[in-house]
Image: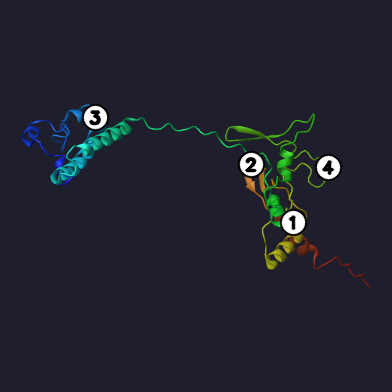
Amino acid sequence: MPACNIQVLGKDKALNSALSSASQVKNVGYIYYSPFVLTLPLDIRKKAQKMIAAKLALAARIDRVHSFPDGSWGRKIREEIEKKVEKFLEPPPQKNIKALPAPLEAAKKRRGGRRARKEKELYAISEMQKLKNRMEFGVEEEEVMGYGESQGLGMLGQNHSGPGAGRIRAAQQNNRNRGKVSNRKAALLAQYGSSSGLATAGTASSIAFTPVQGIELVDPNAAAARVKAANEKYFGSGGFFKAPEKK
């Protein structure tokens, strides 16, 4: 008989069928209700039952062949079972709290070379941001409102001399953050940039405020075109002629 069948010997099915399944212990028999197992805690009784059933199967075979008539092997396996039960009852080993390793205080090696310099230049602070973070002594900085909050502009727009006087953002070209442009596009940009004249401020607008119509969109080049067309009409091809004298 295998050990799995020995541990359920003495199971009373009629008794268990009349009781609630919540309080029943399944697959138990004589070994489970023996005095040795009942003295153990409830959480290790099933383990002890399986272990005793396995040893009982070996003891039955030894008794069948009469190998140890003095019962010495039976006492030996009982001592083994008691030692294993004591091992089950031991508390789990306490985890040692290890200290964190000492931090490395040496400076990390930074990557150098052309690639690293290009990366630093790409994310460097712009001149506009530097001016915004500075304040001039004795000069009130300008503020802008947005979403219910005000933000100071620092020294932006306080340059009172030069071509960019009074501008919040003058037209500047930053070669570090500029994307790659094809030669054809670069030629077109250079052509239109040279024909447009001086650079305009970043806040330049074509909106004009009139007292009658309110806001009016104005083309700054339209007035110059009208004046040029009028001059061509009246003074372009003709001229002043002197009347001939009478003979």
Question: In the rendering, at what x and y percent does residue 41 appear?
Answer: 25, 28
Residue 116 located left or right of residue 53: right
Please identify, in this view, whether the residue under mark 1 or under mark 2 is nearer the observer.
1
SS class, disc 4: loop
Q: CA distance from mark 2 to mark 3?
A: 96 Å
Q: Position of residue 204 (x, y in %)?
A: 70, 47
* Of the image marks 4 and 1, the number of the one nearer the N terminus: 4
Label 3: element kind: helix
Q: Circle 1 sits in a helix, a strand or a loop, which is it?
A: helix
Report the residue marked by disc 3: 42
Return the residue at label 1: 224
The answer for how far apart the CA atoms under marks 4 and 2 are is 36 Å
Q: Residue at x 81, y 40 (%)?
A: 160
Left or right: 118 as drawn, with respect to 62: right
Q: Amino acid at mark 1?
A: Ala
Q: Residue at x 8, y 36 (%)?
A: 13
- Report the residue marked by disc 4: 161
Residue under the point 52% across and 34% down: 98
Q: Nearer the viewer, mark 4 or mark 1?
A: 4
Cβ–Cβ below 8 Å for labels 4 and 1?
Answer: no
Q: Residue 212 has which mark?
A: 2
Question: Which is in the foreground here, disc 1 or disc 3?
Answer: 3
